Amino acid sequence: MDTLNDILFYVLMATTCICALAVVLTQNIVRAAAWLLFTLAGVSGLFFLLGAEFVGSTQLLVYVGGTLVLVVFGVMLTAQGPFVNMRIGAAEWAIALAVGLVLYGVLSASLIISKPPQSDLNRHVDATMPDSSVLGASLLGQGQASPTGFLTGMPPAMRRERKPMAYLLPFEIVSVHLLVVLIGAAYLARAKRRRAV
Amino acid sequence: MSEWLSSHRALVDGALAIVEALLLLGFVAGSAVFFIWLERKVAGRIQDRLGPTRVGGRFGWLQTIADGIKLLVKEDLIPADADRMLFRLGPYIAFCGAFASFIALPFAYTWVAKPLSVGIFFILAVMSTEVFGIILAGYGSGSKWALFGGMREAAQMVSYEVPMALCVLVPVIVAGSMDLNFIAMKQTGGIWNWYLFHDPFTFLAFWTYFTCATAQCKRAPFDLAEAESELVAGFHTEYSGLRWSFFFMAEYGAMFAVSGIAVLLFLGGWNTGFLPELSTTLARALGSEGRESYLGWAIGNGINVVVFVVKAWVLVFVQMWVRWTLPRLRIDQVMMTCLKYLLPISCILLMGVSVWQVAVNPSVGPYFRYGLCAVCVGLLLWSAVKVVTTPSQLPVSVTGATNLWNRGPIPPELAQKTTV
C-alpha cells in the first residue's frame, strides 16, 4: 500500500469482480445490463490506471455507449411484460460453469507457469512504449512509429524489411466493410417488411 | 514538510484528486444554477415575458436557489411499479456521465484535472454513458411515458453520436492530435487561426457539430425524450425532488461540456483571437533573466479561463436561443435529419478535410482563412449595425391602425371597434 495507484487498483479490481458476479447472478436482463455497466466501467478504469487511456476510452465508447444501450433498447422493443426475467435451466448453468472454470484454469495456469516480469524491466518497457499519439500518427502515415521487422509470410531467402507504412487505408477498408454490412442488414429488414404489407 | 509529503504520497495524491473533483463539481453545479436562471430569462424575453422577477430582486437572481431548496425538501417518491434499483440508479449514472467529461476538459493551457493525450475521445466516450442512465430511468420507471421517452432517447443518441464524432474528427485531422491542449494551442494568435476558418470543411463541420451536440444534449428542437406535449415529461415523468434535479444538472453540465468542446476545437479555445497566448507570453514578460515568472503564467491562465468560459457560455446561450425559437421536430423527422442529412454531410466533411490537408497547396490556406474570416466578421458587424439602426417594427392591427403600443389616445377607428 505505498501509492494511491495500488489502493485504487485493488478497489477497482474488487468492484469489477463483484459487479461481474452480480451480472451472472441477476435474473432481470436490464438489471444485469446495469451491473455490466459497472463491470465494464471498472475494467476501463483499470485501463486508465495503467495509462492505457485510448483502450479505456474505446472500452467505454464501444461497450457502454454502444453495446449496452443496444441491449436495453432491444429489451424495450421486444419485451411483452413490464420487466423481463431470464429463466435459466440447470443444464445451461452447468455448461456455463464448465466453460468459466476451464477459462479460469487456463488463465491461472498460464499466470503461474510464466515468470512474472522483473520490475526494472517493466519500468524500462513503460518508458519506451509509444503512447496513443504515436499510434495515431502512424495511422496517418506520419512519424516513424511503424513496427520494424521482417515481412511475414515470405520464404527466408526473400525476407525483406517492412517499410514504414500508414494504417489508415486498411483501417478505413475494415470500417467501410462494417458499414456495408449495416446498410445491407437495414435493407434486408426493410424489404421484408414491405413484402409483408 | 517535503519529507512528509513524499512519504505520504497516497494521501497527498488522494487529497489533490478530491480537491480537483470538488472544484469541478462546484463549477458544474454552480453553472447549472446560473444556466437554469438564464434559461428562464431567455425564454421569457423571447416569448415577450419577463421571466423570474420575484426572488432576489429585480432580475430574480435567487430563483434557482429557491427552486433548489424546494427540490431538496420534496418527498422522495418511487412509483410502486418501478424497478427500485434501476429507478434510483438512473439519475446518478446520467450525472456521472456528464460530470466525468469535465475531467479531460481543459479550461486553460494545462489547467485540466487530468491531461489526456486522447482527451476529446475520452470526453465523447464518457458522455455516451449519460445516455445509459437516461435509458435506465425510462425503463425502470415502470411507466409508459417514461418508457417511450427512454426508447426515443436511445434511438436518437445512438444515431447522433456518429455524425458528432465524425465532425469532431475534422479539426482533429487538421491539428494532428486528440489532445485538447494541443489543439487549442495550435489556434493561437489572430482570429483567422481558429479552426472555424481553417478551410471550408472545418467551417461546415462546426455547424454540423453544433447541431449534433444540441441533439446529444436532447435540447429542443431535438428534445423528443421529454417532449412534454406528447409524453408528459418523457423519461423523467416519474421523478421528483433531488433525483429529478440530478437530470437537470446532467443536462446543463453536458450543454457546457459540448459547448466547451466546440470552443476548443473550432473557436480557438482560450485564445482571445487578437492577442498572443497569454499564459506563456505573460510568464516570459514578467520573468527576469530568462526565467519564466510563475505569477505571470498564473495571471495569463486566469484570463484564459475567463475567455474560455465566456465563449462556452455564449454557445450555451445559443442553445437556449434555438430551444425557444424553433418548434420541436417529430421523432421520424429527428431520425431523418440525422441519418439522411447529418451523417452523409459529416462523412463528406471528413473526406473533404483529408483531401484538403493532403492535396491543396499550402499557400492557398492563408488566403482562404483571411477571406473567410473577413467575410464572417463583416457579416457579423453588418448585422449588428442593422439591428442597432433599424427602428423596431410596431405591431399592426387588423384594422390597419398603427402605433398600438403608444400610450396616446386610441385611434378613432379602434375606439369605434372597442365601444361596440
Image (cartoon, coloured by chain):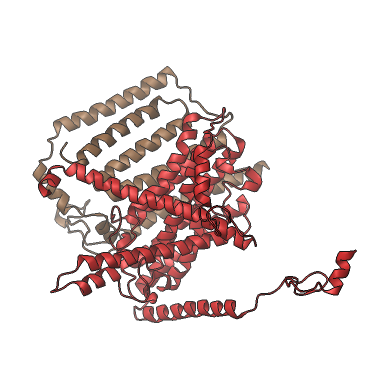
| Residue B200 image-quadrant placement | bottom left
Up the image or down, A37 lies above or below B126; here it is above
Q: Residue at x 34, y 78 (%)?
A: B362
- Picture coordinates of residue B87 (x, y %)? 50, 34
| Residue B287 image-quadrant placement | bottom left
Q: In terms of depth relative to the viewer, which is nearer, A136 or A98? A: A136
Q: In terms of depth relative to the viewer, which is nearer, B416 or B38? A: B416
Q: Is residue B318 left or right of residue A192?
A: left
Question: Do we see residue B177 in this rendering?
Answer: no
Up the image or down, B246 lies above or below B110; here it is above
Q: Residue at x 27, y 35 (%)?
A: A11
- Picture coordinates of residue A66 (x, y %)? 44, 45
| Residue at far right of view | B420
Q: Is residue B87 left or right of residue B367?
A: right
Up the image or down, A127 lies above or below A104; here it is below
Label the brown chain with its letter.
A
Q: In terms of depth relative to the viewer, which is nearer, A107 or B29? A: B29
